[in-house]
Image (cartoon, helix red, strand yellow):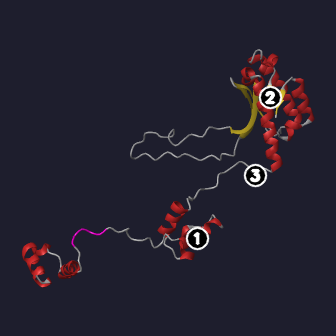
Amino acid sequence: MSTKDIHSDLVETLGDSSPPYSTVACWAKEFKLGRTSTEDEHREGCPSTSLTEDNVKKVEVVLADKRVTIRHVARVTGISYGSIQRILTNELHMRKVSARWVPRMLTDEQKKKRVDISRANLKKFQADQENFLSRFVTMDKTWIHHFDPETKQQSITWKRGNEPTLKKFKVSSSAGKVMVSVFWDAEGIIMVDYLEKGATITGSYYAEQIRRLQEAIKEKRRGKLWAGVLFHQDNTPAHKAAVAVAAVQEAGFELVE
């Protein structure tokens, strides 16, 4: 049969579902050239035009500047945004992350000192693991406000339709605050000290706090003074003053660095 007759026969049999003449002509040509099957021949698939060694090297520009954006790389290299994403994740095994916040940047000397202090404290813990926590006392200071602001949820009330809406005034959070020193151990708070208005925490003031702390421990934590208090404080100037250090020694506290 000629190609034209084959196509006419298919149109008569299949109607609108018949293949176009160009497809029939293509298959007829294939069979004339020796093809014996209508199954598709095996092939490797469409070659990737973007995933080439040259493109991977172009994308490696991110190694020089790790803050560069994918859009910038795409603009510079002429490679598509999606292709760059695939190269970064699948070929270079990279992902974008944010920098992690740390309290402060330490020098090598400060890092070494922290390691030494940690080892010394660990040695104290290992020497008396059973009693270490019960002997430990620490302190910290914070600002607290005189008022306890009412939340929006707490201010909800019933009202009739014709009644005016209640008003809630905002109070400046900086007004009426006081410095509080809190001393506590594993069992809870031992002593709270409120700084008087206009006063400042000096070495002498802190020394007096230590003496009152000693009395509070004697009253609330029977046996702790006899076992020996491991006292931890921060390194503010008032705490390192000679009069404050003397008060800590007189109280019989062992300072934990």
Task: Give the magenta part as a residue range.
Answer: 36-41
Of the image marks 1 and 3, the number of the one nearer the N terminus: 1
Outermost left residue? 12
**Residue 220 sits in which quadrant?**
top right
Q: Quadrant of the N terminus?
A: bottom left
At horizontal 77% and vertical 17% (from top left) the residue drawn is 219
The x and y percentages for residue 162 are 40, 47
Picture disc at residue 57: 1
Q: Which residue is mark 3?
A: 105
Quick one: SS at disc 1?
A: helix
Please, what is the three-letter code of the amino acid marked with disc 3? Answer: Met
**182, above or below 93, in the image:** above
Circle 2 sits on which residue? 231
Q: Quadrant of residue 98 in the image?
A: bottom right
Along the horizontal axis of the image, is 205 left or right of 221? Answer: right
In this rendering, the answer to whether 197 lies above or below 46 is above
Quadrant of residue 115 within the rendered picture: top right
Q: Which amino acid, by three-letter code, is at mark 1?
A: Lys
How far apart marks 1 and 3 lie (CA) works out to 35 Å
Name the residue rendered at 54%, 41% in the picture.
151
Q: Between disc 1 and disc 2, whose residue precedes?
A: 1
As helix, strand or loop, the secondary structure at mark 3 comes to loop
What secondary structure predominates along the stretch shown in magenta? loop
Circle 2 residues within 10 Å: few <14, some 14–19, many ≥20? some
